[in-house]
Image: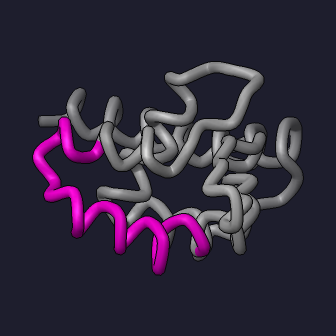
Amino acid sequence: MSVLKTLTTRYAGPIDTDDLYYVLSNRRRRMTLRYLLDHDSSEPITRRTLVDHLVEQGISRDSANVSLYQVHLPTLAERGMVNYNSDRGLISITERGVVTITVHGYIQTFLNANR
């Protein structure tokens, strides 16, 4: 059984491969999922906290704020990767998000090992 199939069926239910690749195709979405996973709290974080993190990674504040609000957080929420309350600006990662960013880690490990 493949790693992806094991992860998606055991922990988060089936994840569409196209959704997985689409989410992982954008650096800000990957950074968002990684931060949420590393944050490891039972409490949701605020969008402002996430914007501050992206700014620390070299992304301009306006660009980070607008792209998260208009594109990336709704995309992640629609695909079940995060819980996102846009009215309150609160975000938390779901099991699907954990699986998605974990798969990304496996891909990176594989690619780095084969360089």
Can residue 65 be found in the magenta stretch? yes
Of helix, strand and loop, which mostly describes the magenta segment? helix
The residue under the point 56% across, 30% down is 37
| Residue at the image point whose x is 50% and y is 51% from the top | 47
Q: Position of residue 42 (x, y in %)?
A: 76, 23
What is the magenta range? 54-74
**Above or below, comparing residue 94 to residue 24 in the picture:** above
For residue 43, what is the image quadrant? top right
40 sits left or right of 78 in the view: left
Q: Relative to residue 67, is residue 69 drawn left or right?
A: right
Q: Is residue 50 left or right of residue 2?
A: left
What residue appears at the point 45 percent right and 36 percent down from the top-left corner? 34
Whether the magenta-drawn stretch holds residue 70 is answered as: yes
State the quadrant of the C terminus.
top left
Which quadrant of the view contains residue 112?
top left
The picture places residue 65, in percent across and down from the top left corner, at: 35, 63
**On the rendered structure, is 78 left or right of 100?**
right
